[in-house]
């Protein structure tokens, strides 16, 4: 059997359209540009429509095809409207990268239900809604596919001050494993990438003493760059990774070595 082979012994499908969410900022643009360099047309989506358009323009300037979409992934109706537009204008994605995420670090006892709803809505309902919206078309197309969910090492080893977020990302890891079992027979893989501390505004929003302590603890003595995370996402998104599913990969410079 060839790597990336679809169900029923079909030959590997050449990489098709990739959708990347959270496309305005940091890890997503790095991922989208890497996938574009590997020959994939891109649909890039974000709550920040102008930011998504900036990323699409950057991809187009590099010579690849890209379109930008404004979406609130925590609202299933918004996701379905984006899905309808992408299917009509660009076709069926072969890769879904559920990357958009959000948090505000604070002690658990200082959090309130509206904050829980927001954190769970963006970080957990978002990947669920995007996967649910696109999977029927991916399955009907019969070419297999790749779903890569960006979780967090907060899900694997915990993170004080990010307790609700860690719960949401833990949900993303469990969701990825169970969905992987459900769609394996369609040649669709589902995997999770868990970034450790990464040099983006989401990380810089944490208290300075927390940032400094984390950086000191990383065996490689530097934060991840967005490109470090993009490489792991692109690996799971590749045709060659067709026999890997339900897996969780930490990208943390050795900070976490979860078994
Ligand atoms: N930066 C880190 O240290 C770190 C660590 C672990 C995990 N992560 C995860 O990596 C992913 C990317 O993080 P990043 O650091 O690039 O974050 P970022 O804040 O730079 O980018 C996140 C993007 O998601 C978008 N977004 C937020 N809510 C949205 C919504 N409802 N609908 C659509 N888009 C929305 C934002 O507009 C933003 O462009 C996230 O899932 C994050 O949780 C980041």
Image (spheres, rainbow, N blue to C red):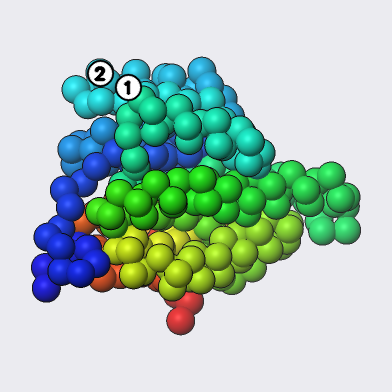
Horizontally, is 93 left or right of 157 in the view?
Answer: left
Label number found at residue 58: 1
Q: What's the CA distance linking mark 2 and mark 1?
A: 5 Å
- Whether residue 149 is visible to the viewer of this picture, yes or no, is yes
In this view, the residue farthest toward the front is: 140
Task: For the residues labelled 2 and 1, say whether their Cβ atoms are less than 8 Å apart.
Answer: yes
Residue 228 x/y as whole percent: 35, 50
Where, by quadrant of the figure, is residue 248 drawn?
bottom left
Residue 165 x/y as whole percent: 68, 55
Q: Is residue 19 above or below residue 46?
A: below
Q: Which residue is mark 2?
A: 61
Other-residue count near label 1 (Cα within 10 Å), few / some / many at <14 / 14–19 / ≥20:
some
Locate the N terminus by quadrant.
Answer: bottom left
Horizontally, is 186 left or right of 14 in the view?
Answer: right
Asked whether 104 or 22 is in front, the reply is 22
> Residue drawn 55% across and 31% down?
81
> Residue drawn 88% across and 58% down?
109
Mark 1 within 8 Å of ligand 1, using the beta carbon:
no
Horizontally, is 41 left or right of 129 in the view?
Answer: left
Residue 10 x/y as whole percent: 15, 63
Asked whether 58 or 175 is in front, the reply is 175
- Whether residue 224 is visible to the viewer of this picture, yes or no, is no
Label number found at residue 3: none
Secondary structure category for the residue under label 1: helix
> Residue drawn 45% across and 46% down?
134
Secondary structure category for the residue under label 2: helix
Residue 227 x/y as whole percent: 34, 44
Asked whether 81 or 112 is in front, the reply is 81
Other-residue count near label 2 (Cα within 10 Å), few / some / many at <14 / 14–19 / ≥20:
few
> Residue drawn 21% across and 46% down?
15
Q: Is residue 34 above or below residue 162?
A: above
């Amino acid at each position: 059997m060839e790597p990336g082979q679809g169900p029923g012994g079909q030959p590997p499908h050449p990489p098709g359209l990739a959708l990347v969410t959270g496309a305005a900022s940091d890890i997503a643009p790095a991922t989208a540009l890497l996938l574009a360099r590997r020959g994939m047309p891109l649909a890039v989506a974000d709550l920040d429509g102008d930011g998504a358009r900036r990323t699409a323009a950057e991809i187009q300037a590099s010579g690849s095809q890209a379109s930008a979409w404004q979406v609130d992934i925590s609202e299933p109706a918004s996701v379905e409207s984006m899905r309808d537009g992408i299917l009509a204008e660009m076709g069926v994605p072969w890769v879904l990268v559920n990357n958009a995420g959000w948090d505000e670090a604070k002690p658990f006892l200082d959090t309130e239900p509206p904050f829980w709803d927001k954190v769970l809505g963006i970080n957990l309902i978002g990947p669920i809604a995007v996967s649910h919206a696109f999977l029927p078309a991916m399955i009907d197309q019969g070419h297999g596919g790749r779903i890569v969910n960006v979780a967090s090492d907060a899900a694997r080893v915990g993170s004080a001050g990010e307790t609700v977020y860690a719960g949401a990302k833990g949900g993303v890891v469990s969701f990825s494993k169970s969905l992987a079992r459900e769609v394996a027979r369609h040649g669709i893989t589902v995997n999770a990438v868990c970034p450790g501390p990464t040099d983006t505004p989401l990380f810089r929003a944490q208290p300075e003493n927390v940032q400094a302590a984390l950086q000191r603890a990383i065996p490689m003595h530097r934060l991840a760059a967005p490109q470090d995370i993009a490489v792991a996402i692109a690996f799971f998104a590749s045709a060659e990774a067709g026999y890997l599913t339900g897996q969780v990969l930490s990208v943390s410079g050795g900070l976490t070595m979860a078994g």
